[in-house]
Amino acid sequence: MEDTRAFIRERYGRAVAGRAGETTGRHGCAGVPDLTRSAYDEATLAGSSLNAVAQSFGCGNPTAEAGLRPGERVLDLGCGAGLDLLLAARAVGPSGRVIGLDMTDEMLHAASRNVAGQGNISLLRGYLEDIPLPDGSLDVVLSNCVINLSPDKEKCLSEAFRVLRPGGRLCVADIVLLHPLSKKAAESLALWSSCVSGALSEEQYVALLERTGFTAIHLRRTATHAFPDVLAAMAFPDCTPEERLEMDGALASAIVKAVRPVF
């Protein structure tokens, strides 16, 4: 687990630093051009920090799907540079609270700059598998293309379940696998950090949420990603040509929702 975390931390630390000062998000979590930017319309992004947009690595817009209400307490797992924090803070208003959790110092530093002045946002350093918050303390848990990166997804989702109050909601955007990968690709840390080899199938995702205790589970595929040769070489530069061939048609973005039952 620590080797995977260290690789991801180093990879995303370099990536967010490389995007400082940009004005458009060019790649999402899986390296798909315009994946992040295309998930948000211009009206949604209006008023957000340009760096928060440029430094985002998501694959969807979970804040638009979560039905956030004024006064709610929200956690963003793997908050990155803070774009979804800003959108969630806008939705819950000054009476609400939004917490961003990330394990990467460079991401938290970027987020602290991007959300500066937002009194209803706070940041925490920590792991998805060990959330430093009390039981039942949240109304909503969000995440954007991060759970696939976790080396222990059952623990991650169990922790999300724990910190939600009864009736609380989980809403994540994530990458899902549409067909299995070869053993070599599945063991590639480069592909894991690109949101590929750590991704679950749609069936595995639903089954894991059920096993964790969630109910009202709904998974909706939002986009299927094609990787012709030139795009695959750009999106997965650390991979062999053979590994890149496996990516074409193997990945989709999805919105996943679930509820911690009241009983």
Image (cartoon, helix red, strand yellow):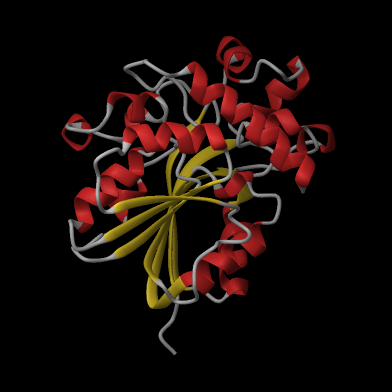
Find residue 141 and report its image quarter. Answer: bottom left
> Which residue is farthest bottom?
263
Viewer-side residue, 229 vs 26: 26
- Measuring 37% from the left and 15% from the top, which residue is drawn there? 22
**Residue 9: image x %, image y %?**
64, 35
**Residue 258: image x %, image y %?**
44, 67
In this rendering, position of residue 234 left or right of residue 262: right
- Measuring 66% from the left and 42% from the top, which residue is drawn there? 179
Viewer-side residue, 120 vs 169: 120
- Is 216 rendered above or below residue 263? above
Viewer-side residue, 116 vs 194: 116
> Which residue is farthest right?
183
- Measuring 25% from the left and 60% from the top, which residue is drawn there? 68
Q: Can you say which quadrant of the picture contains the C terminus?
A: bottom left
**Residue 128: image x %, image y %?**
58, 55
Find residue 41 and report its image quarter. Answer: top left
In this rendering, position of residue 56 left or right of residue 158: left
In this rendering, position of residue 137 left or right of residue 18: left
- Is 146 rendered above or below residue 246? below
**Residue 255: image x %, image y %?**
42, 51
- Measuring 62% from the left and 31% from the top, which residue is drawn there? 194
- Is 154 rendered above or below residue 235? below
